[in-house]
């Protein structure tokens, strides 16, 4: 049995309810920032104590817990080491859980999110608006625009929900089949909780009460040339609407500004794309001319705005089969996203700041 | 009047165990075991008839015994005694055809139970993450046992159409594990070092042998009140294990190899006839497969005793320690934790001095 020194603290919960109350519409303060440690060596205040994640290990009831909690810095460090070791122990012995989709909540929270967070906070400096539009519980479908040649916008949206939502919600993204063909990428995607963008998986996740993220533009959106930036492409066949209708899950439109400029795609090498089996092969001012250096995205300033939810539970069960309603709802979602995109673009001071 | 149960494939461990188990049921009068070779294990006093189900002799056996329940377990991926893949395929497909033909002519048969496998769903990155009984796979299995299972199920469906008075149950088992299961996956997991496909971490589901016997028993009797035991059912334990988790829980290190190398090595091993490392198994170990078991719970009314992790733990116990036993790794981490605690425990006293 692990006699690891892990102290369950209710710190997280109290903070969660605090931000939950402040739903004024302004940017809520970062509700959750989790890391295994070493993320900010400069912070000498009790900040590191708060960064340690409560681990689901039975309370060993050691008296040293109280002592450790009493003296700030040392206790925090000790706890962090203990927490890290308990994590390591579980990882090494395989005693952790994944769900049916392969989502590894522990790995996502403790490692993968900590890797994405610097990109999110320091590189793209993402500003999140309207996170209170995401319901605290139950299934919901977040529909976002897609851009940027590489699907970094999806990952950033996931970090945004993870770090800012007061109710500890995890975004389950629906990804293109190409993601699940590529080695390494598919493994990471599954562990991050992504799954194939198909009606079966989306419906199953929504039925489980999960928050599902979808980018219906697909490759048309992510692989569009730079000249067409912020022009929404066709929203597939609107399958996401019928899925949401069937589950009665609200649709939350989401607009992401900033992702369009990370890799300005000025050309598309169709021959190379066909050769590699990709839907497009981007040519940017730097890629592939500068080699791997050219693959570094431009440090644009991002804004992610979650819009007002569009309820779908008021429709009759057969509504999901009504193509007219489907097109109308799809257009409504699409227009709302496009409208918000223009509004955010007007408000934006510059691409990089 | 009691039932007469005819069981095929009794020379295998699973068939033998099922015969011994079903004999103890009070309403079973007589159990007849059929196989090509006499079983090495005892059948608990059940009759054994040496017959090849690929020959029409099986019809005579069926007529002479007057069996009312036929349990067809002779659908397997591995040869019984140093046979070739061709003979396995013949037993699976021609054997099933002969048996079904005999059943069709028999006036006494009331119930048919066929052992199939979740292999029929194939394993592809473009399939939904969780397969239900009605999921049609994007790419049908191209060969090997999976194709046999698809064909067997096709013939069984045809039989069910022609004899609507016979209750037909098809049980699609996930990977069967247990202390003495001799499935290809079990022999793979018994390797000292597990070759894996680089960049893929497949999701696997297991079902314990005891649960297999129990569900076979349930489906070979009259349905209990409120349940229905004819139809097609996925049978798997709850939950999912990743291959990486399996290897860590077994304490067997993995060697990730690129996919082309694995495919090539698999065909080499196959030509040398060392072990059945078939392409469909490589696909399973690349993309994994998870099935939905709602029908098993709600319609068939069966709740497995072992979860996926539980079945795997039972299997791991029977196999002995690997090269990197999880207990040793956990002990090492605990020792480090102990050290760090002791050193930090001294810290306050030093500062007090």
Image (cartoon, coloured by chain):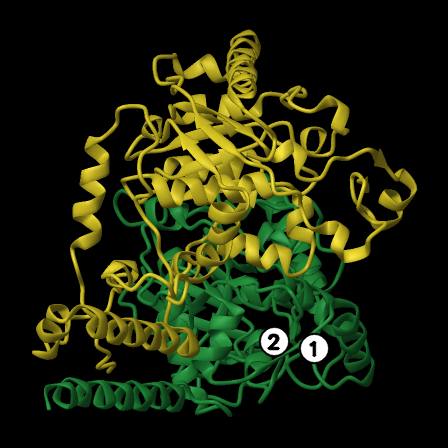
Q: What kind of element bears circle 1?
A: loop
* Between B286 and B303, the one nearer to me in the picture: B286
Q: Chain of mark 2?
A: B
Q: Which mark is residue B276?
A: 1
Q: Which residue is mark 2?
A: B184
Pinpoint residue B275: horizontal percent, then vertical percent: 70, 82
Badge 1 density bin: few <14, some 14–19, many ≥20, Cα 10 Å: many
Residue A329 visible in the shown view? yes
Alpha carbon of mark 1 to alpha carbon of mark 2: how far? Answer: 7 Å
Q: Which mark is residue A212?
A: none
Mark nearer the N terminus (1 vs 2):
2
Pinpoint residue A9: horizontal percent, then vertical percent: 17, 60
* Between A33 and A243, the one nearer to me in the picture: A33
Q: Is residue A258 above or below residue A345?
A: below
Pinpoint residue A171: horizontal percent, then vertical percent: 43, 41
* Between B93 and B104, the one nearer to me in the picture: B93
Locate residue A115 relative to residue A3 in the image: left or right. Answer: right
Which residue lies at the image location 77% right of the left edge and 35% below the top edge?
A265
């Amino acid at each position: 049995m692990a006699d690891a020194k892990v102290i369950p603290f209710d710190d997280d919960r109290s903070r969660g309810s605090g931000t939950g109350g402040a739903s004024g519409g302004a940017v809520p303060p970062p509700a959750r920032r989790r890391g295994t440690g070493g993320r900010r060596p400069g912070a000498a205040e009790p900040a590191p104590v708060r960064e340690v994640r409560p681990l689901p290990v039975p309370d060993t009831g050691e008296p040293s817990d109280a002592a450790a909690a009493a003296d700030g810095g040392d206790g925090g460090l000790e706890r962090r080491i203990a927490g890290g070791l308990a994590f390591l122990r579980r990882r090494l012995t395989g005693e952790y859980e994944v769900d049916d989709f392969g989502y590894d909540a522990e790995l996502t929270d403790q490692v993968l999110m900590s890797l994405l967070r610097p990109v999110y906070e320091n590189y793209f400096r993402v500003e999140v608006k309207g996170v209170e539009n995401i319901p605290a519980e139950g299934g919901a479908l977040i529909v976002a625009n897609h851009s940027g040649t590489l699907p970094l916008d999806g990952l950033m949206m996931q970090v945004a929900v993870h770090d800012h939502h007061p109710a500890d919600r995890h975004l389950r993204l629906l990804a293109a089949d190409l993601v699940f063909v590529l080695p390494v990428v598919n493994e990471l995607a599954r562990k991050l909780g992504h799954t194939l963008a198909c009606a079966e998986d989306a419906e199953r996740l929504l039925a489980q009460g999960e928050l599902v993220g979808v980018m219906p533009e697909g490759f048309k959106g992510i692989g569009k040339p730079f000249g067409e930036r912020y022009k929404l492409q066709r929203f597939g066949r609107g399958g996401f609407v019928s899925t949401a209708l069937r589950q009665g899950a609200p649709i939350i439109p989401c607009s992401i500004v900033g992702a369009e400029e990370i890799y300005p795609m000025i050309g598309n090498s169709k021959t190379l794309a066909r050769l590699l089996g990709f839907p497009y092969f981007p040519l940017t001012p730097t890629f592939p001319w500068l080699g791997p250096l050219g693959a570094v995205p431009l440090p644009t300033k991002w804004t992610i705005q979650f819009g007002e939810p569009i309820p779908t539970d008021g429709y009759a069960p057969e509504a999901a089969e009504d193509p007219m309603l489907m097109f109308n709802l799809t257009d409504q979602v699409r227009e709302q996203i496009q409208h918000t995109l223009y509004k955010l673009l007007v408000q934006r001071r510059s691409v990089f700041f | 009047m009691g039932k007469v149960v005819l069981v095929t494939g009794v020379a295998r461990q699973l068939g033998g165990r099922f015969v011994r188990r079903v004999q103890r049921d009070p309403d079973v009068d007589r159990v007849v075991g059929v196989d090509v070779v006499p079983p090495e294990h005892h059948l608990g006093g059940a009759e054994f008839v040496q017959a090849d189900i690929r020959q029409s002799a099986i019809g005579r056996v069926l007529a002479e015994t007057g069996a009312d329940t036929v349990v067809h377990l002779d659908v397997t991926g591995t040869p019984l005694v140093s046979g070739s893949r061709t003979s396995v395929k013949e037993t699976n497909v021609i054997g099933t055809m002969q048996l079904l033909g005999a059943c069709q002519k028999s006036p006494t048969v009331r119930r048919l139970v066929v052992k199939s496998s979740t292999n029929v769903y194939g394993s592809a990155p473009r399939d939904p993450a969780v397969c239900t009984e009605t999921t049609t796979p994007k790419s049908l299995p191209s060969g090997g046992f999976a194709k046999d299972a698809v064909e067997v199920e096709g013939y069984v469906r045809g039989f069910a159409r022609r004899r609507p008075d016979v209750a037909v149950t098809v049980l699609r088992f996930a990977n069967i594990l247990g202390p003495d299961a001799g499935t290809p996956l079990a022999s793979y997991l018994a390797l000292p070092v597990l070759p894996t496909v680089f960049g893929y971490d497949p999701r696997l589901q297991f079902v314990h042998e005891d649960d297999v016997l129990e569900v076979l028993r349930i489906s070979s009797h009259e349905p209990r009140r409120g349940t229905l035991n004819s139809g097609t059912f996925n049978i798997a334990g709850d939950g999912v294990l990743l291959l990486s988790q399996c290897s860590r829980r077994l304490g067997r290190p993995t060697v990730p190899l690129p996919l082309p190398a694995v495919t090539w090595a698999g065909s080499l091993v196959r030509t040398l006839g060392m072990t059945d490392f078939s392409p469909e198994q490589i696909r399973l170990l690349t993309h994994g497969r998870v099935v939905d078991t709602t029908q098993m719970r709600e319609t068939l009314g069966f709740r497995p005793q072992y979860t996926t992790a539980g079945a795997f733990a039972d299997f791991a116990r029977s196999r002995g320690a690997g090269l990197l036993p999880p207990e040793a790794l956990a002990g090492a981490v605990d020792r480090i934790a102990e050290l760090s605690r002791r050193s930090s425990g001294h810290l306050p006293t030093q500062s007090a001095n």
